[in-house]
Amino acid sequence: MVKGFYNIYVNNQLLQLIQRSDLAFISLSEGQLKMDYDANPKHLMDAIEKLEGNQCKRVVLYTEHLDGLWSRFTEIFEPIAAAGGIVYNDRKEILTIYRRNFWDLPKGKIEPQEKKKEAAIREVKEECGLANVEIVNKLGNTYHTFGSKDKRKLKISTWYTMYSEDKQLTAQTEEDIEKVTWMSLKEFSQKAKPIFPNILDVVEAYSLKNQHYA
């Protein structure tokens, strides 16, 4: 199992930053590349541009010094912190939203002086109209880029598993949310399309931890 890595979605294509020692765990298919960052530091910019230009579906960039590679990446992309949740109920359904033609999970930008957990709860309540929601545990982080080549940004989203039994759901229309609904994991993964790849990663991580919920 790969221990040290970052999965970053650039133009919805996957950039993986990993430790060289974990390279043996990586397999590639057609349209995917691997590059040695330590042999050529310019490979980071090459990888970003290939993904931004839809020249390949996935790039694996490996290094002896993952922290240094990550630090260099965040010099190119301005980090934006966000937080959200995958909320479940007693029927083992998860709370989903439909916004700008995509199915998504509730999340939003962390405000100044706000803690991650506070932001996650606030965003879930605001976007879905929930009165009561509680954090169960931390699920993990996702990373995706946006913006222009002149002003590249990286959204770092911290995700929590949450619980709520609120029956009343209200979409936050001022945030372009059209629908808020409970779905089974199977329904969300198979029928709620299109879905951002980083959101599928969150659902997969949740499913692995809660296999009896599927």
Image: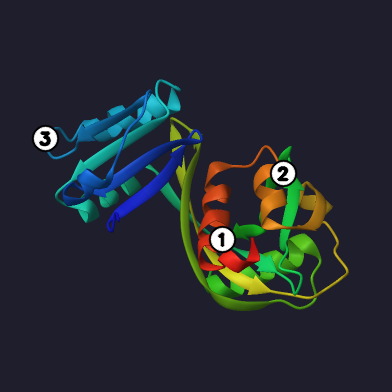
Q: Quadrant of the C terminus?
A: bottom right
| Residue 7, position as x, y percentages in the image | 39, 47
In the picture, measured across the screen, residue 43 lies left or right of residue 95, that is left
Disc 1 or 2, which lies upstream in sequence? 2
Vertical relation: 11 (above or below) 124? above
| Residue 63, position as x, y percentages in the image | 18, 45
Q: Which residue is at a point 79% across and 70% down the rendered structure image? A: 130
Disc 1 or 3, which lies upstream in sequence? 3
| Residue 88, position as x, y percentages in the image | 69, 68
Q: Which residue is at a point 46% across and 41% down the rendered structure image? A: 9
> Label 2, on which residue?
192
> Label 3, on which residue?
39
Circle 1 SS class: helix
- The reply to whether discs 1 and 3 touch (Cβ–Cβ < 8 Å) is no
Disc 2 or 3, which lies upstream in sequence? 3
Mark 2: amino acid: Ala
Mark 3: amino acid: Ala
* In this view, the mark in front (1 or 3): 1
Mark 1: amino acid: Ser
Location of residue 150 by image quarter: top left
Q: Which mark is residue 207?
A: 1
Q: CA distance from mark 1 to mark 3?
A: 38 Å
